[in-house]
Amino acid sequence: DTAVSQTPKYLVTQMGNDKSIKCEQNLGHDTMYWYKQDSKKFLKIMFSYNNKELIINETVPNRFSPKSPDKAHLNLHINSLELGDSAVYFCASSQTGGASTDTQYFGPGTRLTVL
Amino acid sequence: RKEVEQDPGPFNVPEGATVAFNCTYSNSASQSFFWYRQDCRKEPKLLMSVYSSGNEDGRFTAQLNRASQYISLLIRDSKLSDSATYLCVVTDSSYKLIFGSGTRLLVRP
């Protein structure tokens, strides 16, 4: 009965490959997010979707493409992986995405290592 | 200048100690304020929201000073299980979460 789940948990791949990370939430939330936590532990938002619609798109290379087939799922596809993409990627969800009282719930993270 | 700044620590304290973390933020238009906790190799989890009037949750007390753009977290009677990284988080006008890099706490027996 995990609230926010991600697969895979670990991903090791070669430079230049294309990979996807999947996220699902069973909380009935309207908004989902992707964050990147780099080696310096900074957690930065990449994308946010509300009801399948993109609402936040930070300055992220266009090799990163999020896709939300429905409001319970937000997947992240990365093309032409680079060494600098190595990080932990966290998915999160919140009820509305637009209220000061909105709490974000994070998935367990996907540790991506690009060799 | 980073949007949210924290002392990275680590703060190494004995069980039972009181420890305080501080955080400053640069955007005076920030809307909401939080402390999150992140255990090693785990996801961040909300510890508590922070209000101008200050708020307390058991052994944890959070304070916000909007004039100085400063947030604090006080932990009383530290437990071994409090060892973690504490992330100071603010939201901008679009409720986007802006995270600090965290302050690491180690509570020793």
Image: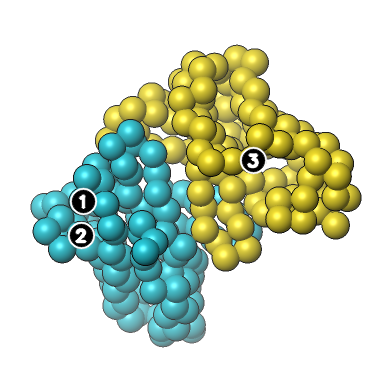
For the residue carrying disc 1, how many other residues have a C-alpha within 10 Å: few (<14), some (14-19), or many (20+)?
few
In the picture, measured across the screen, residue B58 lies left or right of residue B79, that is: left
Q: Are marks 1 and 2 in contact (CB under 8 Å)?
A: yes
Chain letter, cyan in picture = B
Residue B108, position as x, y percentages in the image = 48, 82
Label 3 sits on residue: A61
Residue beneath the point at 59% across and 41% down: A60
For the residue carrying disc 3, how many other residues have a C-alpha within 10 Å: few (<14), some (14-19), or many (20+)?
few
Q: Are marks 1 and 3 in contact (CB under 8 Å)?
A: no
Mark closer to the observer (1, 3): 3
Chain letter, yellow in picture = A
User: What chain does badge 1 belong to?
Assistant: B
Task: Please say if A91 is above or below B54.
Answer: above
Q: Identify the mark at residue B28; answer none if there is no mark.
A: 1
Residue beneath the point at 67% across and 54% down: A87
Q: Earlier in the sequence, mark 1 or mark 2?
A: 1
The disc labelled 1 sits on which kind of residue?
A: Ser
In the picture, measured across the screen, residue A73 lies left or right of residue B67, that is: right
Q: Identify the mark at residue B59; answer none if there is no mark.
A: none
> Which secondary structure lies at badge 1?
loop
Label 2 sits on residue: B69
